[in-house]
Image (cartoon, rainbow, N blue to C red):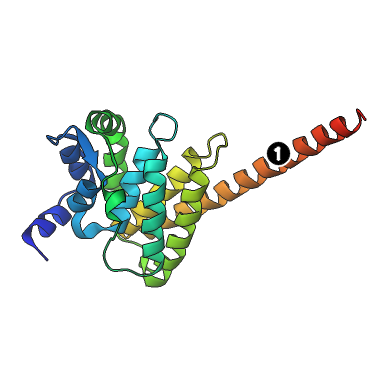
Amino acid sequence: MSESSQSSDARRFSDVLEQLAGGAEPRLTLRELVAAFGERGFGALILVLSLLALLPWPPGGKAVFGLPIILLSIELALQRDEVWLPRWILRASVSRSAFGRGIRRIMRPVRFVENLTRPRLLFMTGEVADVFTGVVCVLLAMMMALPIPFGDMLPGVALALFALGMMQRDGVAVLLGVVGACLCGLYLFLIWTTVVEVGGRVWQWITGLF
């Protein structure tokens, strides 16, 4: 492990976020995020991307975060040791000033949660658990792209819990992520049944006109 990787791993997650917000370049690239978190890898990157996805962005802006989360989750499920992303995705960027404003808004709760987490229920963060977590995170990231009310917020919170659990080796956070994923599935089911019911009634109304 290089000296830079060791220093990156030694810093708290919140400290790395603040350093990224204070960078010199006007835009923050995904390549810079990957380099900043070093060997923390999947958990840290999915966490920061999930937190960014929870912030308000222009239409289509959340897609910048959804696709990398899906790729990272697939790699996690496939038991890859190191993060790999295509070069064109690594070039994706957001405004550093907007990133900094968003980070300042969430820094207090991030530090609070950071202090609560610790290694526990380690069987929930092992290799077998990572396969399950990766598959669920893929589904949650896909749900984020659906045009439904709160369709990005609910899976974003669940993704953040899974990622926090992976990064801190906290099985309780992973369990909370499972609960969040179940709530997302229930919410999606309710939305689907509502759409089907409304669509059926509209169809009956249209066919009744003829």
Q: Residue at x 82, y 36 (%)?
A: 203
Position of 120 compared to 142: left or right?
Answer: left
In the picture of the structure, the residue carrying the numbered disc 1 is 195
Which one is in front, 142 or 4?
A: 142
Q: Helix, strand, or loop for circle 1?
A: helix
Q: Residue at x 31, y 49 (%)?
A: 89
Type of the residue with mark 1: Val
On the image, which quarter does residue 52 sit in? Answer: top left
On the image, which quarter does residue 125 sit in? Answer: bottom left
Residue 88 appears anywhere in the view: yes
Query: Does 19 appear above or below 120?
Result: above
Residue 118 appears anywhere in the view: no
On the image, which quarter does residue 113 sit in? Answer: top left
Q: How many marks?
A: 1
Residue 68 point in image, percent of width and height: 36, 51
Residue 210 point in image, percent of width and height: 93, 30
Which one is in front, 82 or 123?
A: 82
Q: Residue at x 12, y 66 (%)?
A: 1
Residue 53 point in image, percent of width and height: 39, 39
